[in-house]
């Protein structure tokens, strides 16, 4: 610059600009600042050599330390798995109906199940496990197939109406749309609603129910868990409790499918899920006599 | 004269004045002895408190003062504070703030002069200087002397003592946060938490640096409190003042003898400057640099006694009194200086907060309850048509002994409840659980109401059984379908 000059008051050179008599001093950077800056430059060079940094055509440089964030993540996950190994081994060897004997193990199973539920189950059953029309509510005390730990675990393992799984639970409510006339269906519907006090019902409906429904749902309509036949005398309706939806379920029943988790999840996760579902408030006590010999045979297979 | 020179006559300008080393001279007197006492008391409290034991029974630590961050408890003798009771600590801090206002408006910078840690540790380090290098003149000579083996040895010796004190200071700090004997053993065996070593290292470094080298620079440049105090002190606050109307013009005793009446009482011996820990000349008037440690009063009184003049040329006085006295009036009595509307108001606020805290402390319950209703699903229809709600009810037993706590449903006659370790058949109006000492017990509580129940508000009431039952209640809601039919 042409107008650079030495400022006599400070002994510093000016930058040579002048605005209405105001000039700017060309004060050098402080030495400590410069050295810090150089040190950070050196550090940055070393850093880009040690760690993944430069993007290239195919992929970036990998860095001589071989560090990756994914590797960090895997290591942490492995540490976590190692830490839980003993617990999982214990869960794998404890029969599920014996879980309540060990409250600490039960608590661990429930919290593990809570996490697994969020990943695998909420899509149908909802994040609060409250279900929706066609997807059972897991909080209540109404169970189609039974609500003790062992039965829940079985349902989880083999699913409901899961094609290709022999041990799956299957119930097939026939469609009465052809067998019964519209009037008869209305009469049966009225009778079914009378079982839970929602309607008066009449003798004709009761006769139709006894002829067509009682075989599976029982003479009083209280259902049969062996067959997965729902209790029709309670306040809970899987597909809705209105006259219209009950009638529709008689004419042309819907059959929900629950996947068999045996092939998708490891047995410990299924066990934890069963414990969690059982803990939601409707879980029933396991009774030795309720153990189904056929179920046991299936499990051993 | 150029404009730069008018603004900063000593250009090229530096932002900070170069530090003038301060080598205060030894002095004895009532204020010095008072400072010794304050130093002894404050240091004893600081170093000793963590080692005081206080029996709280088998379920709580036996350290009298313990800030147990890991377990989120604060113990102070008979008082135990949980995090949600932090307002007690906040109240104490507000009291400390108002207390400083009170003290400052009454007796000026008494905090700075006597009890501020920076003052106490600086004083301590200056005594170390005196012990190693001798008094003021010897230290100044040594400072000016070229480096020699002797000087190096003295410096290393002095800094070692600094470092030991600094380490001791940092080491004492961490004792407030864990059981002191255990932590001491862990510390020396290398088993203490890294944060313990880090804290000790940082505090050792700051003590070494601030007490050993920065000293009065902290008060002059770093600390905001002298600036705030400048706003708190008024004309009627006691401060250390030089009575210039009496002292000026200065002159030696000989000059005064030659010309009686021409000179004031100040003999310009500069002893007041020599003893000052910040190196300030009080005769220039009140200043941020004067921390009102009163050592100049001791020095001047001693000189006045030697030359046979009345004491108090430098003395605690209010600016108003100074003007009064200069005009020939009498100073106000001390109680009028201390008791005036401003100090009384500060004291009332201070004492009010203190009494409120004591009242809150005396009447607080050691039982707490908090209720968290399930929101997803918010209610559950059961097969018989009855409605179930679920809650997490947390019972806090804030005493260091186990207690039986009874949980009741209030304002909801039709309802019953059970917990997840019971079954619906056992549903009852009340549940009793043992809550372990100093613990929050979470209970998952199901409340059931018959078919057709409407949404409504009700309370969970907790009662801790025992000789002195305590109660706590929490309001919550029961949700139900609008139409359960």
Image (spheres, coloured by chain):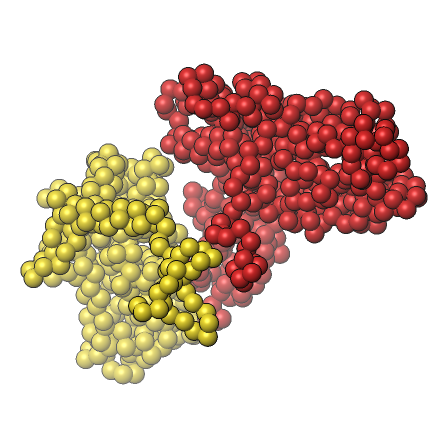
Q: Above or below — where is B234 with respect to B441? A: below
Colour chosen for chain B: red
Quick one: B70 or A194, which is closer to the camera? Answer: B70
> Residue lying furthest bottom in this view?
A182
Q: Above or below — where is A14 with respect to A187? A: above
| Chain that appears yellow | A
Left or right position of A299 against A30: left
- Residue B53 in view: no
Q: Above or below — where is A143 with respect to B350? A: below
The percent position of residue B213, horizontal first and vertical second, equals 51, 32
The percent position of residue A118, horizontal first and vertical second, equals 29, 56
Quick one: A48 or B348, which is closer to the camera? Answer: A48
Q: Residue at x 83, y 42 (%)?
A: B245
Q: Residue at x 38, y 19 (%)?
A: B189
Q: Which of the image's four quarters has the N terminus of chain B?
A: bottom right
Left or right position of B124 against B391: right
Q: Residue at x 51, y 30 (%)?
A: B212
Quick one: A6 or B105, which is closer to the camera? Answer: A6
Left or right position of A43 against B305: left
The percent position of residue B436, horizontal first and vertical second, equals 51, 33
- Residue A122 in view: yes
> Residue lying furthest front in this view?
B258
Give residue A199's quadrant in the image: bottom left
């Amino acid at each position: 610059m042409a107008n650079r000059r030495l400022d006599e008051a400070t002994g510093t050179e000016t930058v040579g600009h002048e605005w209405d008599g105001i000039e700017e001093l060309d004060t050098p950077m402080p030495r400590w600042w410069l050295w810090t800056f150089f040190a950070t430059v050196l550090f940055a060079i070393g850093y880009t050599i040690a760690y993944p940094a430069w993007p290239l055509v195919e992929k970036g440089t990998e860095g001589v330390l071989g560090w990756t964030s994914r590797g960090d993540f895997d290591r942490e996950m492995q540490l976590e798995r190692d830490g839980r190994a003993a617990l999982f081994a214990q869960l794998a060897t404890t029969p599920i109906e014996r879980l309540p004997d060990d409250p600490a193990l039960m608590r661990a199973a429930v919290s593990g199940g809570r996490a697994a539920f969020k990943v695998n189950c909420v899509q149908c059953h909802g994040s609060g496990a409250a279900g929706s029309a066609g997807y059972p509510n897991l909080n209540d005390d109404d169970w189609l197939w039974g609500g003790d730990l062992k039965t829940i675990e079985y349902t989880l393992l083999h699913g409901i109406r899961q094609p290709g799984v022999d041990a799956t639970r299957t119930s097939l409510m026939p469609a009465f749309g052809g067998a019964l006339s519209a009037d008869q269906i209305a009469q049966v519907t009225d009778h079914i609603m009378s079982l839970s006090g929602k309607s008066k019902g009449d003798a004709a409906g009761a006769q139709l129910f006894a002829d067509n429904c009682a075989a599976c749902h029982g003479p009083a309509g209280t259902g049969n868990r062996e067959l997965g036949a729902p209790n029709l005398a309670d306040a809970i309706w899987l597909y809705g409790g209105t006259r219209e939806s009950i009638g529709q379920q008689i004419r042309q029943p819907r059959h929900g499918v629950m996947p068999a988790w045996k092939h998708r999840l490891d047995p410990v996760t299924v066990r934890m899920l069963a414990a969690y579902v059982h803990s939601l408030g409707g879980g029933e006590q396991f009774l030795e006599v309720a153990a189904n010999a056929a179920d046991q045979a299936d499990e051993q297979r | 004269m150029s404009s730069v020179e008018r603004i900063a006559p000593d250009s090229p300008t530096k932002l900070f004045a170069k530090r003038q080393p301060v080598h205060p001279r030894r002095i004895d007197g009532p204020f010095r002895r008072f400072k010794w006492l304050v130093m002894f008391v404050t240091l004893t409290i600081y170093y000793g408190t963590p080692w005081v034991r206080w029996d709280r029974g088998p379920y709580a630590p036996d350290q009298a003062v313990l800030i147990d961050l890991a377990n989120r408890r604060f113990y102070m003798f008979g008082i135990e504070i949980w995090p949600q009771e932090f307002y007690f600590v906040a109240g104490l801090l507000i009291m400390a703030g108002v207390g400083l206002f009170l003290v400052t408006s009454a007796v000026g910078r008494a905090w700075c002069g006597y009890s501020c840690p920076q003052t106490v540790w600086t004083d301590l380090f200056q005594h170390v200087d005196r012990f190693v290098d001798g008094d003021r003149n010897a230290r100044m000579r040594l400072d000016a002397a070229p480096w020699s083996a002797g000087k190096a040895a003295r410096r290393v010796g002095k800094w070692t003592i600094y470092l030991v004190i600094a380490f001791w200071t940092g080491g004492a700090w961490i004792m407030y946060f864990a059981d002191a004997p255990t932590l001491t053993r862990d510390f020396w065996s290398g088993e203490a938490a890294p944060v313990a070593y880090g804290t000790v290292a940082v505090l050792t470094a700051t003590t070494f640096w601030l007490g050993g080298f920065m000293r009065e620079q902290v008060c002059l440049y770093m600390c905001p409190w002298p600036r705030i105090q400048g706003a708190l002190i008024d004309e009627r606050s006691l401060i250390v003042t030089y009575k210039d109307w009496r002292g000026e013009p200065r002159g030696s005793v000989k000059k005064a003898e030659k010309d009686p009446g021409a000179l004031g009482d100040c003999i310009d011996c500069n002893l007041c400057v020599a003893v000052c820990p910040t190196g300030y000349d009080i005769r220039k008037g009140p200043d941020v640099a004067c921390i009102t440690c009163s050592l100049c009063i001791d020095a001047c009184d001693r000189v006045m006694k030697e030359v046979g003049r009345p004491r108090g040329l430098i003395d605690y006085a209010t600016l108003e009194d100074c003007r009064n006295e200069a005009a020939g009036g009498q100073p106000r009595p001390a109680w009028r200086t201390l008791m005036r509307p401003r100090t009384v108001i500060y004291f009332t606020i201070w004492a009010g907060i203190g009494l409120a805290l004591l009242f809150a402390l005396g009447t607080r319950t050691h039982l707490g309850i908090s209720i968290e209703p399930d929101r997803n699903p918010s209610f559950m229809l059961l097969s018989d048509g009855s409605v179930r709600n679920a809650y997490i009810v947390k019972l806090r037993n804030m005493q260091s002994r186990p207690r039986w706590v009874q949980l009741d449903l209030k304002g909801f006659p039709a309802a019953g409840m059970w917990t997840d370790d019971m079954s619906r058949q056992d549903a009852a109006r009340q549940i009793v659980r043992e809550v372990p000492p100093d613990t929050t017990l979470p209970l998952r509580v199901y409340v059931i109401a018959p078919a057709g129940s409407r949404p409504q508000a009700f309370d969970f009431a907790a009662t801790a059984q025992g000789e002195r039952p305590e109660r706590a209640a929490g309001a919550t809601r029961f949700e139900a379908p609008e139409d359960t039919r």
